[in-house]
Image (cartoon, rainbow, N blue to C red):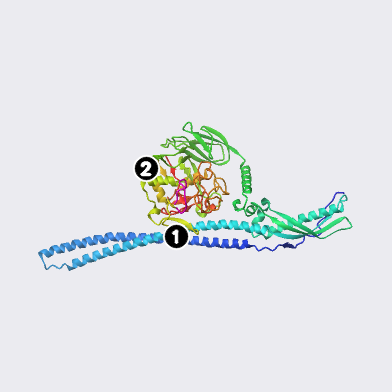
């Protein structure tokens, strides 16, 4: 007779004996959360103060305008009084008894009123300058708070992982009762072994359930329990009681000692956070591949015909960044949105986004252009002697999605907006280097803003502090000639690209934010061009695990390029760009001493045009 299991005779013992462990990580998580709330409150206060300061500055400016208008009126009154007094003096010549005291007093009052108004104007200008300084300092404070907030956010994730591992990987014991009916073919020993094995299994399940129920983030962990692969390990077991009944049933009570097993990326899976906060990144990579596979299966479906035509021969069609040859072109594509770009050397590019829901025909009209750029070619203009300009690579026309596309960003990255890049352009393969900037200074004797006044800022305890000793030549650390130049302001960068334009005859510019994000993403929609996890050793940021992290910028090109051939779009140094709507200077890309979460393609920080620090550089573009 085959063995059959009887219903559980006794419920699994309710008593679950945990090994007492002081959870030091709980306090750490709580403290960090409190710090985050405090910094968020400070940032909100700084934003409110920014609005207040700008309102005060507007009032001061309006008052200054009133004083200047009044100055014109008082000057007119002074001139009239002077004319009157001169006329009186002429009368004295013919009639010495003429009284001129009244005219003299009137002139004196006009002069005094005019001088008093000039003094008020000077005072008002001084007050405005002081208020503008307050606005700049408040902007620096907000800049610092953003970095501190992101730093604490990262610390929080590490602390959550540490707390979860402490809570999960603890030892405890479970008393489990199990009854089975022995098979006729079983020996006594076999029946006992089976009963004990089933008791161990029940104890393991009970222990796992209790672990999950007692976690600080139990609800989130339960949602991801199946995907995590978390397990428990049996350390040992002892029989509390056991015996056989007259009907061939065997009952056993086991005291089982167990330990939670949470390894590698399992904690990150349970908390649904980036795998870089855990030791092993391989699971994250496999999970990303699985996620991509699921997404791909979900997108499989109806296919529609797309026909692409243009008014020129020998053009090239790019659909979602992939070349499909020249027009006329006819192919089948999945339903949904697709970016269409048609380009040809010597012509302005055509770009369009089509939401494919039926058979569709695109007719692109390409107009002749003065541009001599060819997509994908490397360009480097000669300057003078052996000096050469920045190494450029030509990128196609297309459409840039600017902003946080994954939901992992900050409020100033929303909403996502679509910007059309109407023509191809050359973009720096690397940020501008120390050697390239030295060529500019040698040719022009240009003096940077850091060298003219106050020096250059560096982070000290998370706060940007200026030092007159720091500038692009001496940023506070040793740098090689192929390190990215730092300690340059937006104004310095503007002077550099103007010199490049004048020297080469081509048009160089500081990128707009849309152009920068378009080239940094290289056709992707993820936080980083390789995915949504920054990983370890892929870029130079504070917690990216490189030899330069939180120390200094790495030499340009130390990490792989994105699919369009650009290096260092993630981390290393923040790069100056201009908001394509307002022209406001915006920093992009993150840096060696900032959090990895600020090295995302969408991250942005607005800063004054004269700000400079040893973690900010620039990358240039060439439009023709």
Q: Residue furthest top?
A: 313
Residue bearing the label numbered 2: 502
Magenta-span inclusion, residue 45? no
Task: Measure how far apart labels 1 and 2 are at the Cα level.
Answer: 37 Å
Camera-side residue of 30 and 74 = 30
Residue 531 seen from this side? yes
Q: Main secondary structure of the magenta part?
A: loop
Give coordinates of residue 428: x percent, y percent.
46, 43
Mark toward the start of the polypeptide (1 vs 2): 1
Give coordinates of residue 81: x percent, y percent.
21, 63
**Dot 2, crowdedness within 10 Å: few (<14), some or many (≥20)?**
few
Position of the C terminus, as image quadrant, is: top left
Query: What range of the chain is rendered magenta?
Result: 475-486
Residue bearing the label numbered 1: 138
Please determine whether, in this image, residue 172 is positioned above or below residue 599: below
| Secondary structure of residue under mark 1 | helix
Camera-side residue of 309 and 113 = 113
Residue at position x 63%, y 50% from top? 280
């Amino acid at each position: 007779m085959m063995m059959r299991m009887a219903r559980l005779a006794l419920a699994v013992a309710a008593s679950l004996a945990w090994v007492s462990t002081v959870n030091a990580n709980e306090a750490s998580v709580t403290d960090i959360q409190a710090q985050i709330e405090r910094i968020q409150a400070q940032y909100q206060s700084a934003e409110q103060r920014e609005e207040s300061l700008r309102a005060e500055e507007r009032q001061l400016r309006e008052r200054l305008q009133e004083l200047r208008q009044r100055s014109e009126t008082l000057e007119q009154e002074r001139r009239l009084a002077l004319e009157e007094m001169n006329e009186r003096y002429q009368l004295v010549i013919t009639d010495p008894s003429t009284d001129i005291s009244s005219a003299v007093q009137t002139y004196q009052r006009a002069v005094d009123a005019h001088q008093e108004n000039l003094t008020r104007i000077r005072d008002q200008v001084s007050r405005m300058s002081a208020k503008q300084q307050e606005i700049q300092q408040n902007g620096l404070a907000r800049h610092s708070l953003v970095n501190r907030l992101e730093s604490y956010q990262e610390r929080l994730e590490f602390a959550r992982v540490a707390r979860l591992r402490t809570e999960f990987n603890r030892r405890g014991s479970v008393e489990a009762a199990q009854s089975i009916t022995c098979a006729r073919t079983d020996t006594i020993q076999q029946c006992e072994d089976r009963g004990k094995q089933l008791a161990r299994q029940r104890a393991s399940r009970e222990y796992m359930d209790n672990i999950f129920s007692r976690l600080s983030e139990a609800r989130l962990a339960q949602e991801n329990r199946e995907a995590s692969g978390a397990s428990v390990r049996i350390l040992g077991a002892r029989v509390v009681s056991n015996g056989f009944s007259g009907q061939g049933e065997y009952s056993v009570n086991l005291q089982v000692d167990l330990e939670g097993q949470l390894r590698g990326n399992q904690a990150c899976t349970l908390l649904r956070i980036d795998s870089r906060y855990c030791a092993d990144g391989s699971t994250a990579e496999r999970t990303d591949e699985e996620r991509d596979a699921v997404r791909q299966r979900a997108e499989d479906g109806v296919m529609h015909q797309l026909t692409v035509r243009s008014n020129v021969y020998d053009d090239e069609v790019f659909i979602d960044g992939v070349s499909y040859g020249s027009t006329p072109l006819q192919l089948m594509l999945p339903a949904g949105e697709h970016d269409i770009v048609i380009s040809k050397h010597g012509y302005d590019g055509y770009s369009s986004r089509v939401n494919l829901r039926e058979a569709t025909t695109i007719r692109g009209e390409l107009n002749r252009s003065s541009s001599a750029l060819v997509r994908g070619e490397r360009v480097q203009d000669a300057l003078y002697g052996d000096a050469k300009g920045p190494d450029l690579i030509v990128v196609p026309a297309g459409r840039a999605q600017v902003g946080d596309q994954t939901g992992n960003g900050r409020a100033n990255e929303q909403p996502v907006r679509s910007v059309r890049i109407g023509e191809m352009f050359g973009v720096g393969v690397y940020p501008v280097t120390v050697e390239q900037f030295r060529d500019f200074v040698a040719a022009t004797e240009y003096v940077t803003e850091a060298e003219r006044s106050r020096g250059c800022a560096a982070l000290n305890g998370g706060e940007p502090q200026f030092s007159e000793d720091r500038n692009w030549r001496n940023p506070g650390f040793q740098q090689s000639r192929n390190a990215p130049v730092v300690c340059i302001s937006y104004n310095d960068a503007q002077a550099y690209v103007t010199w490049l334009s004048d020297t080469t005859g081509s048009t160089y510019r500081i990128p707009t934010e849309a152009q920068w994000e378009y080239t940094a993403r290289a056709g992707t929609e993820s936080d980083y061009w390789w995915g949504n996890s920054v990983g370890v050793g892929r870029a130079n940021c504070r917690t990216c695990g490189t030899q330069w992290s939180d120390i200094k910028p790495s030499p340009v090109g130390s990490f792989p390029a994105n699919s369009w051939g650009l290096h260092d779009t993630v981390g290393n140094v923040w790069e100056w760009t201009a908001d394509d709507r307002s022209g406001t200077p915006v920093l992009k890309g993150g840096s060696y001493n900032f959090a990895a979460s600020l090295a995302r393609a969408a991250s942005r920080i607005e800063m004054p045009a004269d700000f400079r620090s040893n973690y900010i550089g620039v990358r240039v573009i060439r439009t023709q």
